[in-house]
Image: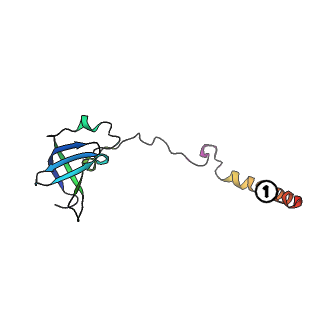
Amino acid sequence: MKIGDKLSGEISGVQPYGVFVNLDNGQQGLIHISELKHGFVSNIDNNYRVGDKVDVIVMGIDEYNGKISLSIRALQKKKIGRPILHKHFWTNYKDKIGYKTIKHEKGQWINSAMSEITKEKQKN
């Protein structure tokens, strides 16, 4: 067995943090709650039961203790969330202003800042 292998197994235990799976090759692995599905897992006990058959992919094998990390989510091609309907731009492209506004206002901003600095120096 290596990382990336697709395996089948049977759920042997359900905990608040994930699901334990007895793999067909005789080993046991854990599917962390974040790897069960895309999105939020509201109640792990309602969706996964001991004895259910599942297909998983091997995400990691700890070389020191032999623990196997599994994922169901990695096998799912589902995208969540709404599609991007439009992009947000930093400029108001509809008015064709762009960065011209900065060009026109820059001189006034500099003059204003310099006059404030001059006033502060005169006070001291």
Report the residue marked by disc 1. 113
Q: Residue placed at 34% from the left, 44% from the top?
A: 79
Q: Quadrant of the C terminus?
A: bottom right
* Residue 62 inside the magenta-drawn segment: no
Q: Residue placed at 46% from the left, 40% from the top?
A: 85
Q: Residue placed at 35% from the left, 40% from the top?
A: 40
Q: Quadrant of the N terminus?
A: bottom left
Residue 11 x %, y %: 17, 44
Q: How many labels does the image show?
A: 1
Helix, strand or loop for the magenta stretch, by majority: loop
- In the image as oriented, which residue stretches furthest toward the right? 122
* Up-down relation of residue 63 to residue 17 (above or below): below
* Residue 97 inside the magenta-drawn segment: yes
Dot 1 falls on a residue whose secondary structure is helix
Residue 36 x %, y %: 27, 45
Residue 71 x %, y %: 25, 50
- In the image as oriented, which residue stretches furthest toward the bottom? 64
- In the image as oriented, which residue stretches furthest toward the top? 46
Q: Residue placed at 39% from the left, 40% from the top?
A: 81
Q: Nearer the viewer, residue 30 or 86?
A: 30
* Up-down relation of residue 42 to residue 23 (above or below): above
Q: Which quarter of the figure has residue 123?
A: bottom right
For this view, does 45 lie left or right of residue 82? left
Q: Identify residue type, mark 1.
A: Ala
Q: Within 10 angstroms of label 1, few (less than 14), some, or many (20 or more) residues? A: few
For this view, does 92 lie left or right of residue 37? right
Q: Which quarter of the figure has residue 54?
A: top left
Residue 25 x %, y %: 10, 55
Q: Which residues are the magenta region? A: 84-98
For this view, does 85 lie left or right of residue 97? left
